Image (cartoon, grey):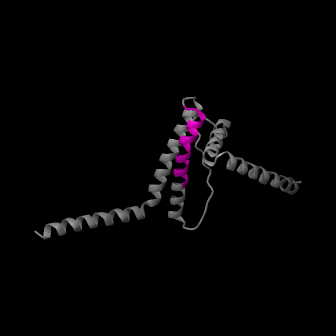
């Protein structure tokens, strides 16, 4: 009678160890899969907004947590590859048939930031970004004669 519980415990331990090993070895593909799945969800939300099926505020509120997950999974997949490094990648989640620089998509992202930050912090951030752009303008024009 004591062998059967030990056998069950042993099988469970081996199964859990296998899951841990697979998750450790395959974490980059797992995070990439989750990232791509959330990019598809973001494209769907954006498409609903662009085609008028979802109002701006609703689409922005739905898009915020999806974008958080995309960022988290991207970070985790990069961390799995090169710990303590950073990289820049273009994130184009415009739905098929729409340009990535469509002003309505920019409006959707801006509204999402506004909803997340609140009016005061959003306007402070926008002012800071404007100042940064203006500070770069003279330098860029003086570097290119």
Is 84 located above or below residue 66 in the figure? below
Q: Position of residue 91 (x, y in %)?
A: 60, 48
Give the quadrant of the N terminus: bottom left
User: Is residue 95 visible in the rendered structure shown here?
Assistant: no
Residue sitting nearer the eye, 69 or 86: 69
> In screen coordinates, is 72 left or right of 140?
left
Residue at 58% x, 43% y: name it.
93
Is 120 located above or below residue 20 in the figure? above
Q: Which residues fall within the magenta stretch?
A: 54-71
Q: Position of residue 11 (x, y in %)?
A: 23, 65
The single residue placed furthest to the left in the displayed view is 1
Judged by its main secondary structure, the magenta piece is: helix
Residue sitting nearer the eye, 126 or 42: 126
Q: Position of residue 6 (x, y in %)?
A: 18, 69
Residue at 13% x, 70% y: name it.
3
> In screen coordinates, is 81 left or right of 19?
right
Q: Position of residue 13 (x, y in %)?
A: 27, 67
Give the quadrant of the C terminus: bottom right
- Say if the magenta span includes residue 55: yes
Picture quadrant of residue 16: bottom left
Residue at 32% x, 66% y: name it.
17
Picture quadrant of residue 106: top right
> In screen coordinates, is 89 left or right of 7?
right
The single residue placed furthest to the top in the displayed view is 52
User: Is residue 92 visible in the rendered structure shown here?
Assistant: yes
- Say if the magenta span includes residue 50: no
Residue sitting nearer the eye, 120 or 134: 120
């Amino acid at each position: 009678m004591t062998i059967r519980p030990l056998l069950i415990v042993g099988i469970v331990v081996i199964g859990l160890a296998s899951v841990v090993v697979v998750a450790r070895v395959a974490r980059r593909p797992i995070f990439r899969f989750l990232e791509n799945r959330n990019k598809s969800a973001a494209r769907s939300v954006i498409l609903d907004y662009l085609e008028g099926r979802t109002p701006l505020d609703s689409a922005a509120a739905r898009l915020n947590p999806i974008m958080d997950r995309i960022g988290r999974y991207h970070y985790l997949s990069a961390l799995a590859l090169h710990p303590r490094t950073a990289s820049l990648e273009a994130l184009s989640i415009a739905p098929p048939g729409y340009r990535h620089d469509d002003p309505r998509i920019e409006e959707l992202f801006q509204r999402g930031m506004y909803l997340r930050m609140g009016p005061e912090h959003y306007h402070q951030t926008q002012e800071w970004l404007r100042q940064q752009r203006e500070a770069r303008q003279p330098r860029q024009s003086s570097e290119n004669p």
